[in-house]
Amino acid sequence: MPTSKVHRIPAAAPDDVSGIEAAIAAGRIDPGGVVAILGKTEGNGCVNDFSRGFGTLALTLLFQRYLSKAQAERICLVMSGGTEGGMAPHWTIFERAETNAANGPALAIGHAHTAPLPPEQIGRFDQVEAVAHGVAAAMADAAIDDPRNVHFVQVKCPLLTAQRIEEAQRRGGTVATHDTLKSMALSRAASALGVAGALGEIDRGSLRDSDIGTHLGLWSGRASCSAGIELLGHEIVVFGMSPAWSGPLVIDHAVMADAIDVEPVRAALGRVGIAAAGQLTAPQRDRLVAVLAKAESSHSGLLRGHRHTMLDDSDISATRHARAFVCGALAGLIGHAEIYVSGGAEHQGPDGGGPVAIIVDRSAI
Amino acid sequence: MPTSKVHRIPAAAPDDVSGIEAAIAAGRIDPGGVVAILGKTEGNGCVNDFSRGFGTLALTLLFQRYLSKAQAERICLVMSGGTEGGMAPHWTIFERAETNAANGPALAIGHAHTAPLPPEQIGRFDQVEAVAHGVAAAMADAAIDDPRNVHFVQVKCPLLTAQRIEEAQRRGGTVATHDTLKSMALSRAASALGVAGALGEIDRGSLRDSDIGTHLGLWSGRASCSAGIELLGHEIVVFGMSPAWSGPLVIDHAVMADAIDVEPVRAALGRVGIAAAGQLTAPQRDRLVAVLAKAESSHSGLLRGHRHTMLDDSDISATRHARAFVCGALAGLIGHAEIYVSGGAEHQGPDGGGPVAIIVDRSAI
Amino acid sequence: MPTSKVHRIPAAAPDDVSGIEAAIAAGRIDPGGVVAILGKTEGNGCVNDFSRGFGTLALTLLFQRYLSKAQAERICLVMSGGTEGGMAPHWTIFERAETNAANGPALAIGHAHTAPLPPEQIGRFDQVEAVAHGVAAAMADAAIDDPRNVHFVQVKCPLLTAQRIEEAQRRGGTVATHDTLKSMALSRAASALGVAGALGEIDRGSLRDSDIGTHLGLWSGRASCSAGIELLGHEIVVFGMSPAWSGPLVIDHAVMADAIDVEPVRAALGRVGIAAAGQLTAPQRDRLVAVLAKAESSHSGLLRGHRHTMLDDSDISATRHARAFVCGALAGLIGHAEIYVSGGAEHQGPDGGGPVAIIVDRSAI
Amino acid sequence: MPTSKVHRIPAAAPDDVSGIEAAIAAGRIDPGGVVAILGKTEGNGCVNDFSRGFGTLALTLLFQRYLSKAQAERICLVMSGGTEGGMAPHWTIFERAETNAANGPALAIGHAHTAPLPPEQIGRFDQVEAVAHGVAAAMADAAIDDPRNVHFVQVKCPLLTAQRIEEAQRRGGTVATHDTLKSMALSRAASALGVAGALGEIDRGSLRDSDIGTHLGLWSGRASCSAGIELLGHEIVVFGMSPAWSGPLVIDHAVMADAIDVEPVRAALGRVGIAAAGQLTAPQRDRLVAVLAKAESSHSGLLRGHRHTMLDDSDISATRHARAFVCGALAGLIGHAEIYVSGGAEHQGPDGGGPVAIIVDRSAI
């Protein structure tokens, strides 16, 4: 029976894969079983964040030492830039293995790639469709039939650069925006709506281009989208519970209604056996394998009725403010900051809030 | 008998004092009784943060409409720049009034100013001495005899600019640093050690210039220091409990051991009648009049064993990262982000942590 | 006969008006004759640049000491934020006086204000119209009949903030953009097209909302627009040559085709009697009273065929990059950097270039 | 006889080496002859600039396809981060070949590596010595006997990170500074003094640690130093004129006395056959193979008597301001911005100025 393994490994730099290499050498990780790697790299998480491409290259070179080029390329590498505040740069490696145990349902992982998207389609309905089909393919890969058992969908999507905009215009095409930073938001937005559509959270049929990035009442409680300058298509990984999978790991999720709404996360922790009044205890922290969250600044400019300045700060991107702040709120609950907080949560949870997935090792309970 | 009043009022901009004006018009604030105003203004909180001077000017103009120039100048205006993450720009007005009630001890407030400090003395032992004497004067003003009853000491201190360094050099003087941003840290450091000395937390006698900003084992659990380009001396406000004061307000404090150590704050809230397992409830929040905290990134580059990147980010000052992150951790506990988190906690709490003061209205309990 | 005086005075901080005060005390400036002040203040020049409002308040307080509130309010205060690179923060004071000399034509100055613009109209055709009418009024005020004799039109225009967007939406209105930084660009764009229309550089009739900020083939060679958070209407000042004015000062202008196209500026200097092969000599610099320029990064992402990264840098706004760079190019020609380079030149000169006005004292020739 | 070839090739991203690859494929570059590559990569040029390491990795992978690992490692890769303003990211490839021509003296290139430097020695006299010996070795490699014939010395030096500081402290060592950004300045400073010593521009014997980064009267008119997080030792390349070399290329240099002192550069261009009154003409630009310059903000806070704000801007590093500004000044003279302007010129030219080297193809004259 398939079983999943999740490894959280620190990175001393965007290209520091020595911890993964050591785990492989020690036999803790089987390179051939690695399905996906989520990296939090320490760039600015915006347009000119080269830490993502640097990390991607370092990981690719590492796995090409153990696998054929084709096998290595099948690994989904999702680099989310930006480790603001106390957030720790780290890798989360998702591995698929076989087990004789039959204690399912357990954490199941599936993935899919989509074809390169022309710059003209970024942030538009064509992108929503492309992602929705990719999510369906990834669910099938994970042997998850019921969308209700999907707890997290990570999508890595492309963005517009000055050069790609030029390229589109040279052939007479139009783009959704000429603001490259804005293009990251639109790409994340379209991708999230693709996930919401695939999971039945919204009605894809009634969507229009103009809803993308604006009609924030439409959202997915399980989508996590990151835009990166280093890819042209999408990399999609679905995480959920499947009876076809076994093993000690379970996953659940919560939706934060705003940037400091940590109580739903506390409740989700309780559901998977980690009940805590205050901050998690050290033993509880040890059982919490991974926390995957989205952060964003509310477009209302308000947080619980008080003004925030994230949208009006021209020195620091709002996405950087939000990652630092939400990571602080979650770290105050969890007790450490080696958590995956990804910026830009357009249509990923309600405006200003976001989905949070937790992966726990029940064997230790 | 003296009694204290504390008003928390939002600011729509660094010069927006309309909320204070309205409170005066409504009779909720007596301009003549105002002792100090702590402002969180939305600049970068670093050298070229003009939102502090702008706020100071707006407040000065406001109070000069109600008071004589001399009276208006006696109000301590402490502008702390930087409202990163979801932190809400706001004013906290501290007022001294008279009451017939005799239910002391209660929150007591005292203040003092020090003479302008030559650039040559910033960040050096002379500054430690100047601040220590100012704290003693402010304690006397608050009728607090026992240093153990002091729960928070706010010090506004000067910094070095390129011009002030030139000025010192022109007369043959030397300065502690040529790095203007660094000078803010050294000035806060010397001021904090002055507070620690006055409160008996360290032995001032054995201090040397070289300890300032480096010997982080020396710290105050109650000092809060902010550097500002708009002043040359120090403005010092002492907050504590005094039997000579009455009224509904009480103050206590906690020391965070690191940037996410919120449990001591939870404990302090419990001591003053606000016990909460998770996030405070709305009614509890209403009774919490003010939260005053310091934030900083640990010099070890680590948070609970995991690496943080705040010290290595040349695009965003470490103080900005830390304010956003610590404000998130505290807001996750408190339930809103209209809290006063001030950056740069050198010698203010242990390295990477900081003091947190809470002011509560016991009458509502 | 009317005559103009132009004073360039350094500022040690956004609120440092001491140099102006000294000039008034020495009788060099008559407060009653001051028509406009252009300030280069040292903020970020973007949305949260409070140095502009701070400077405006300091100047207002200064002039209210010499003039009635109504008279003081008639002075156009145009604060352009952002002194990147070596640009020197300074004030340029434009004064109108009387003279017996009759050596016109000479530098003429006229000004006008427009009514507050609702957030819904910012960046749209309504704004173009409002500005065009304002320019006509300012030309009449300067006694300039022929648009060809207008060499520089400074427009200070409003921008959108998160709060103003909310305000518009609350009453069911729509705004041109939800990106506050972008709104500054759109407001400058609409204002520049208003100037171009008033000067006959474009055909206003055929303009559509969709041209604003996008159809960059439409531009004015004499418009200079700055957006500021501190105003809701427009402040417009027209500079040109008028036979009705006398005195030693003359003005001319050049249009830079790109960010390093300094030769047209060199040619303009030659036309007004300052011919220089290389950098201006010290005596030539002394006769050059003021340089007023616009800077922006080309939307093509290219400068003379080579890629620039200004549009893709998410840590530094493109407007900040462009001001530093263009100021360097002009300072290399002029020989100092106390020049007025304003960012964001949408429709102000060709894409990537911008207008440059020079004011020279011919009496010294 | 040895001859040098210099290729200037644009980079579309920090890891875009496709232009070099194409030149190799076309036979224009012989991988085996490449001695050094200077790259201007588009990071922030400060501590967390990963574009440099990314570029280094991409170049290494490229050359390992043509050369043995040992040969590839002998190529000096000097990545200078930061392409502010209109500066174009690009590679300058320096190649050594053989020729039958005997028209020396001509451009000669020599290089050397130094051993890894412990963090404790960064910014101290030990580093000065290490670099001085490296320069002597590189001169010998270039067959340049007389230091007067050396026109440019590029040194890539290490910096301190939070982790390296920790490492030094763990073994009881001390470091020159705890400020990581500051450490880049100190490392550049010590390296520049090493060059000055090797070229006889200063008396190395009388140097003390305390002079490094402070005694700015000591400087080299030919040193160019860049600090990078990706190396621990030094990479040194010497450029000069040697009778032992032949070919069409010649090199000369100028020293800018301040950030806008372009006239000495104009004079140097004249000396090598490119005399221009204003901006270079297109044909002249074609003959100008490379411009290598240093930029920095003056520590006085002044530029020709006017205040600049580069040192007081806590949002943008002074090195970023200076690169944008000086690149603008040079581009105004040269006519394009694909020039190598490296930030941080401590002891590299006088305070606020810097060396500029020009490489010209005399065959086209």
Image: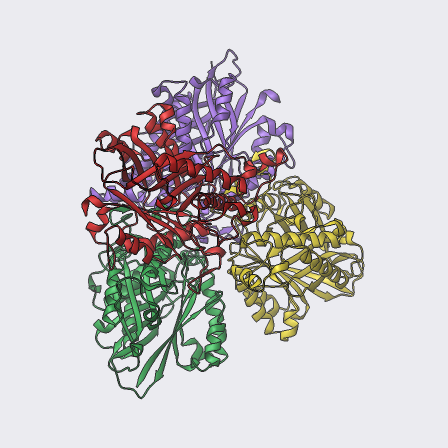
Chain colours: A purple, B yellow, C green, D red
In the image, is C122 to the left or to the right of C73?
Answer: left
Of the pair C139 and D311, the residue shown nearer to us: D311
Residue D90 spot, x, y in % from top left? 32, 41
Give the farthest residue toward the top: A100
Residue D163 appears in which quarter of the rendering?
top right
Give left or right: position of D15 versus B132.
Answer: left
In this rendering, does residue A226 appear at all?
A: no
Judge whether C299 appears above or below D140 on screen.
below
Instruction: Give residue B82's position: percent from left, percent from top.
Output: 54, 53
Q: Is residue A297 above or below residue A361?
A: below
Please provide percent x and percent y for residue D24. Answer: 25, 31
Which residue is pictured at 60% across the width and 70% down the height? B63
Quadrant location of the C terminus of chain C? Answer: bottom left
Query: Quick one: A68 or D287, which is closer to the camera?
Result: D287
Residue projecting furthest to the bottom: C100
**Does residue C148 appear in the picture of this structure?**
yes
* Quarter of the N terminus of chain C within the rendering: bottom left
The image position of residue C94, as x and y in percent, is 37, 75
Front residue of this view, candidates B50 and B360: B50
Q: What residue sits 76% from the left and 57% below the top? A: B106
Total numbered circles: 0
Residue drawn at 27 percent across, 48 percent down: C300
| Residue C207 shown left or right of residue B33 in the figure | left
